[in-house]
Image: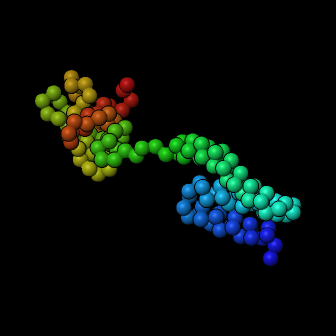
């Protein structure tokens, strides 16, 4: 068995580990093993192959980690849950909202009590509104299209 084939086996094993763990370090070890494999194919001695392994691992980690962090930070954003998930959603009023009585609106089949953002505003039934906030379980809304 040639030494380069051993490095190739190590690289494949660490690539598989990377697929399941997504821990940047195993990817760097796999890249280092590929570099050591290249050194073995060029008939470099074992010490230089090991130096290639370590060097590429360290350079890979230094180079890949900041790039991957930036890549993943761009992809992820906080997910709104609970009442926060309703902010920005559109609803249709089912009961008018007046100065005296809060109205009601339907979002995804759920009927919510609503209050206009502008307390002097009256919202008739059938109006499309946008949720801009909430107070306890009462949604604060404004008619869609009004800024």
Count of numbered circles in the view:
0
Which x, y percent locates residue 61? 63, 49
Position of 111 with respect to 65 (left or right) is left
Residue farthest along the bottom direction in this orientation: 1
Within the image, what quadrant is residue 69 found in? top right
- Quadrant in which the C terminus is drawn: top left
Position of 124 with respect to 15 (left or right) is left
Which x, y percent locates residue 47? 77, 59
Which x, y percent locates residue 77? 46, 43
Residue 38 seen in the current view: no
Residue drawn 34% across the image and 47% down it: 81
Residue drawn 64% across the image and 57% down it: 27
Which x, y percent locates residue 106? 27, 45
- Quadrant in which the N terminus is drawn: bottom right
Residue drawn 74% across the image and 55% down it: 51
81 to 19, vertically: above or below: above
């Amino acid at each position: 068995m040639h030494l380069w084939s051993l490095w190739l086996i190590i690289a494949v094993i660490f690539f598989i580990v990377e697929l399941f763990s997504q821990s940047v370090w195993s990817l760097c070890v796999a890249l280092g093993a590929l570099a050591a494999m290249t050194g073995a194919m060029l008939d470099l001695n074992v010490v230089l192959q090991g130096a290639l392994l370590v060097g590429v691992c360290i350079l890979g980690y230094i180079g890949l980690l900041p790039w991957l962090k930036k890549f993943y930070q761009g992809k992820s954003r906080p997910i709104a849950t609970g009442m926060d998930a309703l902010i920005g959603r559109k609803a249709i009023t089912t009961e008018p909202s007046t100065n005296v009585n809060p109205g009601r609106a339907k979002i995804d089949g759920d009927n919510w009590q609503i209050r206009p953002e502008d307390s002097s505003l009256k919202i008739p039934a059938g109006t499309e509104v946008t949720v801009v906030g909430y107070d306890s379980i009462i949604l604060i809304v404004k008619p869609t299209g009004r800024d």
